[in-house]
């Protein structure tokens, strides 16, 4: 008698862990200049993501070992680029495209590099598919410094997103 009840519960309650999409590491490009607080880092960049889902966490790898806060603004479509080494500012129109801003503030020291994570974000999003019927799309991003780092060429920070996709992507 109890078996049917347990099977009914299993059909309603998820017993398996959620699917997680882990993006490839993407470079937050830098031109090697000395940056001021609030400057855009390099040019805007793109990161491949499922068409829709929930951003669970994000990791930043500071390969230059700067130990200074970096923010990354995520957009659902192309936005007006802010030139590298100029104050990051977006228009009201671009503000409507903004999904979320990641703030990497606390870093773990790995001796030759540092890493920082933003956890339990829980931000739902939707982007256009790369092509008709595709389950993959992209976010457009811009790095922003909150200190005065000098990021060496070839040691640009890397970003990775961990997402719960609404549909399986593989």
Image (tube, rainbow, N blue to C red):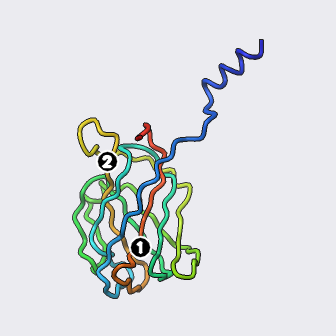
| Image location (x, y in percent) of residue 82 | 25, 71
Q: Which residue, given by chain and number where applicable, does mark 2 sit on? A: 137
**What is the crowding at mark 2: few (fewer than 14 residues within 10 Å), some, or many (at least 20)?**
many
**What is the crowding at mark 1: few (fewer than 14 residues within 10 Å), some, or many (at least 20)?**
many
Residue at (33, 62) in percent of width and height: 141
Please, is residue 38 above or below residue 127 in the view? Answer: below
Residue at (33, 79) in percent of width and height: 39
Secondary element under disc 1, as helix, strand or loop, is: loop
Residue at (33, 55) in percent of width and height: 139
Mark nearer the N terminus (1 vs 2): 2
| Image location (x, y in percent) of residue 147 | 43, 83
| Image location (x, y in percent) of residue 30 | 32, 77
Q: Which residue, given by chain and number where applicable, does mark 1 sit on? A: 157
Residue at (55, 41) in percent of width and height: 18
Secondary element under disc 2, as helix, strand or loop, is: strand
Q: Quadrant of residue 29?
A: bottom left
Question: Residue reaching furthest right?
Answer: 1
Q: Quadrant of residue 25?
A: bottom left
Quadrant placement of the C terminus:
top left
| Image location (x, y in percent) of residue 166 | 44, 39
Q: Quadrant of residue 6?
A: top right
- Of residues 122 and 115, which is closer to you in this image? 115
Please, is residue 84 above or below residue 18 in the view? Answer: below
Question: Residue reaching furthest top?
Answer: 1
């Amino acid at each position: 008698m109890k078996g049917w009840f347990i099977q009914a519960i299993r059909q309603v309650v998820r017993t398996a862990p959620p699917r997680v999409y882990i993006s490839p590491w993407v470079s937050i490009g830098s031109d090697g200049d000395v940056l001021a607080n609030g400057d855009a880092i390099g040019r805007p960049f793109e990161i491949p993501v499922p068409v829709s889902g929930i951003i669970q966490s994000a990791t930043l790898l500071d390969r230059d070992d700067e130990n200074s806060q970096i923010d990354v603004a995520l957009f659902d479509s192309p936005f007006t680029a802010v030139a590298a080494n100029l104050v990051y500012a977006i228009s009201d129109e671009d503000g409507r495209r903004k999904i979320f801003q990641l703030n990497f503030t606390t870093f773990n020291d790995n001796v030759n590099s540092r890493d920082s994570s933003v956890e339990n974000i829980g931000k739902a999003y939707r982007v256009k598919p790369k092509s008709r019927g595709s389950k993959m799309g992209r976010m457009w991003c811009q790095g922003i410094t909150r200190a005065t780092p000098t990021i060496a060429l070839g040691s640009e920070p890397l970003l990775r997103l961990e997402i719960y996709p609404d549909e399986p992507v593989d």
